[in-house]
Amino acid sequence: MFAGTLTRNVETAAAEYTGMIHSTRFDIAIQLETRPKMSERSPDFDVTAVNKSGRKVRIGTAWNETGNTSGNPYISMQIDVGLGPFRVNAVQTKEARAAQSGEFEIIPLVSNGLMKSGSISGELTAMDADNAFTGYIANMMFDLEFMLIENSYKSEETHPDYRIEVSSPRGTPIRVGSAWMAKSSRTGNDYLSLLINTPDGDLRVKAVQNEEQRGGQTFSIIPFIDSGEQPQDAGAGLSLVA
């Protein structure tokens, strides 16, 4: 459950990039400072932040990377703020690349393994504007309220149609998953396939309409059952392909 921004600084700045990273538990200002490379796969940057005592500390490392499919440059980061290591990518929108902007968006990278749906309750409601949805998903261990926002990065059929967002303590949107529009090959009915990063791990569910809901704005969230109908890339983790 991570989000954030990263900005390339002028060449004379001490830190090559500055930015913010957010989760449902923290909002932290970060810097990427160039470090000597010992080998080809050595990190390109140290990720630093200022702790509560005002001391600058190293909280991770980062690499300049290039997408295997898209050929677009991005930054891969491994960070630990004291809660265990996690991975994120800093990517650019088409508009930012076209404008040669130094603005990047920080997004989740990979899942930690898919958990079984088990006993899940949830609901999804289409909003009247912006082609968005609002909803919740819950079990006995967690209760998440979220929104589905149209994926402006989508450039291939297999890319997610929506990003799933919750809020950080300061109200910053945090991307916690992806969603795909789909159609049942058995019934011909439309549904949504959701992959959500919950506190217990990544969870696959479906948002479907029963006979009473069909034609309306409300969907019921149900456990995912592998019937061969899932979108092609729906199991590819949470990384947004840009």
Image (cartoon, rainbow, N blue to C red):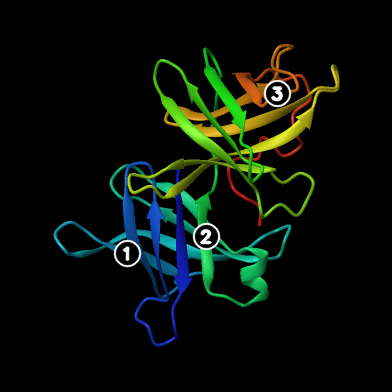
* Viewer-proximal residue among 24 and 55: 24
Q: Quadrant of the N terminus?
A: top left
Rendered location of residue 55, percent (x, y): 18, 64
Report the residue at 71% width, 13% height from top. 210
Query: Is residue 112 in view from this perspective?
Result: no
Above/below status of 84 relative to 107 = above
Q: Mark 1 or mark 2: which is in front?
A: 2
Residue at which label 2 appears: 105
Q: Which mark is residue 48?
A: 1
Rendered location of residue 103, percent (x, y): 52, 69
Q: Which mark sits nearer the N-terminus, 2 or 3?
A: 2
Q: Quadrant of the C terminus?
A: bottom right
What secondary structure is marked by label 3?
Answer: loop
Report the residue at 73% width, 57% height from top. 69
Q: Which mark sits nearer the N-terminus, 1 or 2?
A: 1
What secondary structure is marked by label 1?
Answer: strand
Report the residue at 61% width, 70% height from top. 96
Q: Which mark is residue 236?
A: none
Q: Residues within 10 Å of mark 3 (few under 14, many from 20)?
A: few
Cβ atoms at labels 3 and 1 below 8 Å apart: no
- Residue type indicated by callout 2: Glu
Q: Mark 3 or mark 1: which is in front?
A: 3
Report the residue at 35% width, 63% height from top. 30
Q: Estimate the spatial distance between the alpha carbons at disc 1 and disc 2, rounded to whole Å.
A: 18 Å
Rendered location of residue 238, percent (x, y): 58, 42
What secondary structure is marked by label 2?
Answer: strand
- Residue type indicated by callout 1: Thr
* Viewer-proximal residue among 111 and 125: 125
Q: Estimate the spatial distance between the alpha carbons at disc 2 and disc 3, rounded to whole Å.
A: 34 Å
Q: Mark 2 or mark 3: which is in front?
A: 3
Residue at which label 3 appears: 216
- Residue type indicated by callout 3: Gly
